[in-house]
Amino acid sequence: MKKLVLPLLALGLLGAAAPAQYDIVIRGGTIYDGSGGRPYVGDVAVRGDRIVAIGPHVSGTGTSEIDARDKAVSPGFINMLAHPEESLLVDGRALSDLTQGVTLEVMGEISMGPLSPAMKREFLDQQGDVHIPIDWTTLGEYLDKLGQRKIAPNVATFVGASTIRQYVLGSNDVQPTPEQLVEMQKLTREAMEQGALGLTDALIYTPATFAKTPELIALAKVSAQCGGIYTVHMRSEGDRLEEAVRETIEIAKASGAPAEIYHFKQAGRDNWGKIDAVIGMINAARESGTRISANMYTYTAGATGLDAAMPSWVQAGGTQAWIARLTDPAIRARVKTEMENPHPETWENLYAGAGPDGMLLLAFKNPALKPLTGKTLAEVAKMRGKSPEETAMDLVVEDGTRVGVAYFLMSEDNVRKAIRQPWMSFGSDEAAPAPEGAFLLAKNHPRAYGNFARLLGHYVRDTKDITLADAVRRLTSLPADNLALRDRGRLKKGHFADIVVFNPATIQDHATYEQSAVLSTGVIDVLVNGDFALRDGKPTGAGTGRIVRGRAATSGGCRANARDWEWSK
């Protein structure tokens, strides 16, 4: 027998390892498949970009094997409100989100196309520390550009109704003629066929705030015919919150498609008590057959600009027109008076909702103003010996931008109650930066680095507001179904291998308002389309991400009626 060993070994018939059947096998982890059902200990096998086997035991071997004992294994997380439109063009790793398990960034509250020449000029003028060339015009061209880069996460986008409005009408307080509305509908359809998931709007900002409900319905109907939902930063999240929810429901019903509410909140102490009524309105709409859902971030402060502290009329015509008006003493006096009104009838006054002590300055373009980063508006006003209102106006003029600001507006009790709603998913409402380079020249809201880890660490493990299985469902299959994404959002044979391995006992956010650029910990491995984007807690730098386009782009174009599409309940 000894004489036969070497010949047999040479022939590969004895003692040779069997070839691996899979590229990657994740073994012995606790599988949370995204359904919200009971987890179980098992294995997941990946070949190419797909999950090819899953169960209590997968026989065979993988070229790479991950020991996931005592770890959770789940679908990749979906960031339902993301703003890495620019940051991904600078750094495709998306580290702040990748280290929390995010595998799909959903953008487009104000979309990157279509852009007119004037919009491109304003875009370039308003860029801060991160600079990118604007060498595209349509939304499809932007997606093509992003798809050519080495990006770690998958990316999807909506088309912004405000972007289309500005493209056709400019930034002034005007209403479209019938012919202009037809042009806006045409642009909506084109963007949907280029890959948009649906239509969005941001109705507290100019020029979006000038749009009336019929205009929004007209565009949402086109989006629905193209298989897309309507998603909105509502006209009010405070004083007129119930009216804004009613408008959203009306648009959804009229369009024939579902609607999603961005960053669900009740802004300002006087409005905290409205949460039960609003939840009741959403539940009633759902029970009557109109699917309304929402997403949120897990903090009591929001973040936007000083434009949200001033009336809409002073901002008509765009940023430069706004700045010019703020140099006129008579206009400044009028703006100051309106800022002091806690409950104006025609605009959302976040200045009054947070107060100058509750407004933290985050981002400036002007290097001379950067030392003010991290101070409150009240502190800067005191330093300058001026009123907070005058100081806010001065900062806009001196910086030449809207200035980045965190507004402390919400109640922790309401945050916890919102998290418990079964139709609630989650979004950071932030870019996807890294704690290095130009990203450190301004502060982020800590939600950029901690929104998803905070949900799993604090609100699941610590306060036990929801179970881990339900949290995973609302980070994965719920948003995937709401967006009508096929083959994503679940650990299931045949689905794309977007997978997260994390430690539920240690996952933790570390970013604070004082030190915001701190990565979360506890996520160990992240697969995007079957390749490692994060391995043993470290980014691989691989271009694992893809552009995820909407149904009109992938299923034969738009259709005659929203009823021609299937919508999840």
Image (tube, rainbow, N blue to C red):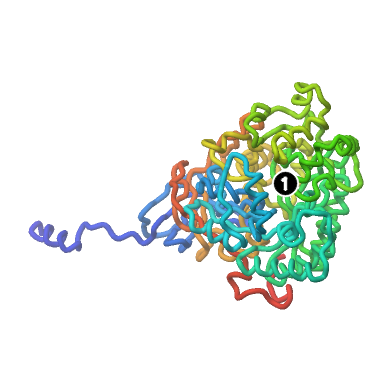
Q: Residue at x 81, y 66 (%)?
A: 253
- Of residues 80 and 111, the one nearer the viewer is 111
Answer with left or right where residue 300 lies relative to residue 505. Answer: right
- Of residues 52 and 337, the one nearer the viewer is 337
User: Which quadrant is the N terminus positioned in?
Assistant: bottom left
Dot 1 corresponds to which residue?
419
Q: Secondary structure at mark 1?
A: helix
- Vertical comparison of 381 with 487: above or below: above
The image quarter in which residue 512 lies: top right
Query: Residue 446: x percent and y percent?
Result: 64, 37
Answer with left or right where residue 544 lies relative to residue 280. Answer: left
Query: Residue 134: x percent and y percent?
Result: 58, 53
Residue 277 visible in the picture: yes
How packed mark 1 is, by other alpha carbons closer than 10 Å (few <14, some 14-19, many 20 or more), is many
- Callout count: 1
- Residue type at numbered disc 1: Ile
Q: Residue at x 72, y 32 (%)?
A: 360
User: Which quadrant is the C terminus positioned in?
Assistant: bottom right
- Vertical comparison of 149 with 271: above or below: below
Query: Residue 322: x percent and y percent?
Result: 78, 44
- Of residues 135 and 153, the one nearer the viewer is 135
Residue 501 visible in the picture: no
Answer with left or right where residue 3 lies relative to residue 434. Answer: left
- Of residues 529 and 198, the one nearer the viewer is 198
